[in-house]
């Protein structure tokens, strides 16, 4: 899991894909945090991505850096505990300008049943189950 988080952080931006009815939706994200042994991301409850994940938790992340890419797929499950939101905001202090743990909007999700695939041209993909 550390390798996955490090890759995402080093890439700086990754792309999160969700499903909106029968339409895939992809957008840039930047949060990747380990809390209590799980990989977390953060968003706002008012955003479409939140609504999409609550309707269908299946999601995939794709990131690229230094000629390699990572695909991470699984289910994103909301963790509504305050301590999970606090941990994310402490890991990403720049988010505090827009979010707070008690604002009713800050939302964190963790990956469940996740599979990471590390790829590079000319190399066999490496599969890691989280």
Image (cartoon, rainbow, N blue to C red):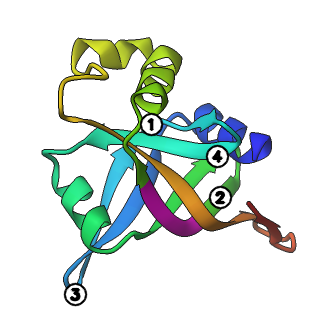
Q: Nearer the viewer, mark 2 or mark 4?
A: 4
Residues under numbered marks 2 and 3 in contact, where contact means CB atoms less than 8 Å apart: no
Q: Label 2 belongs to which residue? A: 70
Distance from the alpha carbon under mark 2 to that under mark 3: 25 Å
Indicate whether 101 appears above or below 61: above
Distance from the alpha carbon under mark 2 to that under mark 4: 17 Å
Residues under numbered marks 4 and 1 in contact, where contact means CB atoms less than 8 Å apart: no
Residues under numbered marks 1 and 3 in contact, where contact means CB atoms less than 8 Å apart: no
Binning the other alpha carbons within 10 Å of mark 4 as few (below 14), some (14 to 19) or many (20 upward) gives: some
Element type at mark 4: strand
Q: Residue at x 60, y 33 (%)?
A: 9
Magenta highlight range: 72-77
Q: Position of residue 82 (x, y in %)?
A: 39, 28
Element type at mark 1: loop
Binning the other alpha carbons within 10 Å of mark 2 as few (below 14), some (14 to 19) or many (20 upward) gives: many
First in sequence: mark 4 vs mark 1: 1
Q: Label 4 belongs to which residue? A: 38
Distance from the alpha carbon under mark 2 to that under mark 1: 14 Å
On the image, which quarter does residue 32 sit in?
Answer: top right
Q: Label 1 belongs to which residue? A: 30
């Amino acid at each position: 899991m550390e390798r996955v988080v490090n890759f995402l952080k080093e890439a700086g931006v990754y792309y999160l894909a969700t499903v909106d009815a029968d339409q895939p939706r992809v957008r840039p994200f930047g949060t990747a945090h380990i809390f209590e042994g799980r990989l977390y991301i953060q968003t706002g409850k008012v955003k479409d991505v939140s609504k999409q994940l609550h309707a269908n938790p299946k999601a995939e992340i794709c990131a690229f850096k230094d000629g390699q890419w990572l695909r991470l797929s699984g289910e994103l499950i909301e963790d509504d505990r305050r301590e999970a939101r606090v941990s994310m905001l402490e890991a990403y202090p720049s988010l505090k300008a827009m979010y707070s743990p008690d604002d009713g909007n800050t939302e964190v999700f963790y990956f469940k049943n996740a599979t990471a695939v590390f790829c590079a041209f000319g190399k066999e993909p490496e599969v890691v189950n989280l």
